[in-house]
Amino acid sequence: MKIVDLIRRDMVVPALQATEKRAILEELAVYMAGRHPRIDRATLSRVLIEREQLASTAIGADDITIRACSRAASRRPAPA
């Protein structure tokens, strides 16, 4: 499976309003939970922050990120 097999248009956030790391992760959680009722916003926010504390997932000069977290927030993989 390739990453492009998992990415769906509704899971891409092209322009975030937040500028600080924690606020960005929380904004991503709000965005995803608002579009997918099975995703718990608080749980997703927590696991994204925990994952980022392990090591940053930002890549490249423009800080493109591929967020990954445990399946605690959702039953299906959902890159953001």
Image: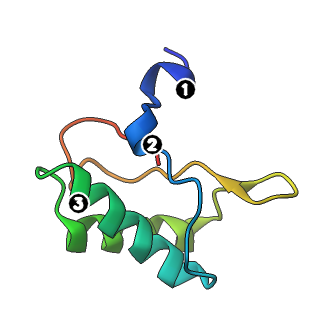
Q: Single out the residue that lies furthest toward the left.
A: 38
Which residue in the structure is indicated by mark 2?
79
Residue 1 x, y percent position in the rendering: 49, 14
Q: Amino acid at mark 2?
A: Pro
Q: Label 3 vs label 2: CA separation? A: 15 Å
Q: In the image, what residue occupies the spot 11% across and 50% down?
A: 38
**Disc nearest the viewer among 1 and 3:** 3
* Image side of residue 38 versus residue 74, left or right: left
Callout count: 3
Q: Earlier in the sequence, mark 3 or mark 2?
A: 3
Q: Residue flagged by tag 3: what amino acid is it?
A: Gly
Residue type at numbered disc 1: Ile
Residue at 58 percent across and 53 percent down: it is 14
Q: Residue furthest right?
A: 61
Image: 56 above or below 20:
above
Residue drawn at x 32%, y 74% as measured from the top left: 46
- Compared with residue 38, is residue 76 higher up or lower down, i.e. above or below? above
Q: Position of residue 37 (x, y in %)?
A: 12, 52
Marked residue nearer the N-terminal end (1 or 3): 1
Is the C-beta separation of discs 1 and 2 under 8 Å?
yes
Pointer 3 residue: 34
Q: Neighbour class for label 2 at 10 Å: few (<14), some, many (≥20)?
A: some
Residue 66, label in figure: none
Estimate the x, y position of residue 15 in percent, counting from the top left. Answer: 59, 62
**Are the residues tagged 1 and 3 within 8 Å (C-beta)?**
no
Residue furthest out toward the top = 1
Residue denoted by label 1: 3
- Binning the other alpha carbons within 10 Å of mark 3 as few (below 14), some (14 to 19) or many (20 upward) gives few
Judge the density around disc 1: few (<14), some (14-19), many (≥20) Cα neighbours within 10 Å: few
Q: Quadrant of residue 34?
A: bottom left
